[in-house]
Amino acid sequence: MTDYSLDWPRALGLETLSAVFRETPRDFIVEEVLGFEPTGEGEHLWLFIEKTNLNTMDVVQWLSSKTGVKTRDIGFSGLKDKLAITRQWFSLRYPGELDGSMPEHITLLRKVRNSRKLRHGNHRANHFVITLREITPSDYLLGHWTESVKSCGVPNYFGLQRFGRHGANLQRAAALSLDGKSRVSRHQRGLYLSAARAYLFNRVLAKRVSSGDWDKPLPGDVMALEGSSSVFHADDSDTEIVRRLSEGDIHPTGPLWGIGESMVTADVKTLENNIIQDFGELKTVVEKAGIKSMRRPLRVLPQQFSITAEAGKVVVEFILPSGTYATSVLREMVKAPGL
């Protein structure tokens, strides 16, 4: 059995303090920022729901039992944590209204109709308000954390929750049988394959963090435009590329492994291939699933980042693009289980 290490190097060189992370659901509040307004009419009922100490699929199951809509026909943009207060959108193709009382820990904040189903990754960003307990940083350290995160960003690691308890999703991904005999649900298979791709990405990013070039151009790099899915080849000797990197306008990318020709060339292609080959079982299972290769930024820049210190606790608030992890921001500043 392969030992999949989940201990990634930190990048900013900041002093880190111990803290208690997620003592209660209220310590981790996240709200989806949709980024557009539903049309107000159509066959799909969109629901903005607040849930406490429930995961996303718990709400999907409840909506299905409430309305009779099959779970596969209930849309959501992203999976949200259980030990948290989360506000997220769901959609269902449903001609009626959602009437009657709501169960404990579920609150309907808004309902609106739309012409299309909500798809994975449709929302633009997530707004986090996170409380860290049993921590008392100095004013200097608070300022240093804030300045460093705002100016440098953080490595865009996938969070530990992507890999399951003690990395169990990776072991299950490696063991996946894709010959039609595997006894896992479609949802579970998706989780395991996503974990495999995430792990390969994190290993590449960890190597570049260790080498100090996760936010610098290397020969053969492919860059991502900030706030966009657009990517392009970059010349590492181009002073304009260096300037745009320093300003946060673009970011180097790493592989979301899959089938198809890799976009990177030269040194970066060699680096990535060498790392991926070390985890051939994950590489193979992703390729057999027929998933197309993509690129993901190695760096993420939190927006509206702030830290407020109170007696024995710190409240950290920021906005991240969808698909990125709050834990990747927090782990640059504090040490706690789950980071």
Image: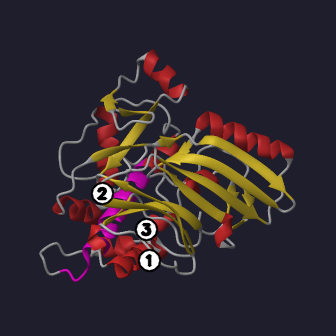
- Say which residue label 3 marks: 163
Sequence-wise, which precedes: disc 3 or disc 1? 1
Q: Are marks 2 and 3 in contact (CB under 8 Å)?
A: no
Locate residue 337: give its quadrant: bottom right
Q: Residue at x 43, y 30 (%)?
A: 217
Give the Cα separation between the discs numbered 2 and 3.
28 Å
Disc 3 + disc 1, Cβ < 8 Å: no
Closer to the eye: label 1 or 2: 2
Q: Are marks 1 and 2 in contact (CB under 8 Å)?
A: no
Instruction: Identify the disc placed on residue 310.
Output: none
Residue 274 colored in magenta in the image = no
Label 1 CA crowd tier, 10 Å (few <14, some 14–19, many 20+): few
| Residue in front for this viewpoint, 284 or 316 | 316
Mark 2 crowd level (few <14, some 14–19, many ≥20, 10 Å Cα): many
Q: Quadrant of the C terminus?
A: bottom right
Q: Quadrant of the N terminus?
A: bottom left
Question: Where's residue 100, x and y in %?
Answer: 48, 78
- x, y percentage for residue 222? 34, 33
Closer to the chain start, of discs 2 and 3, is: 2
Can residue 316 be seen in the rendering of this structure? yes
Amino acid type, callout 1: Asp
Say which element carries label 2. loop
Q: Which range is magenta?
A: 182-204
Figure check: 178 above or below 89: below
Mark 3 crowd level (few <14, some 14–19, many ≥20, 10 Å Cα): many
Magenta segment, prevailing SS (helix, strand or loop): helix
Query: Residue tagged by mark 1?
Result: 58
Indicate left or right for 118 with 262 as reference: right
- Marks 3, 1: nearer the viewer: 1
Element under disc 1: helix
- Does the rendering let one see residue 220? no
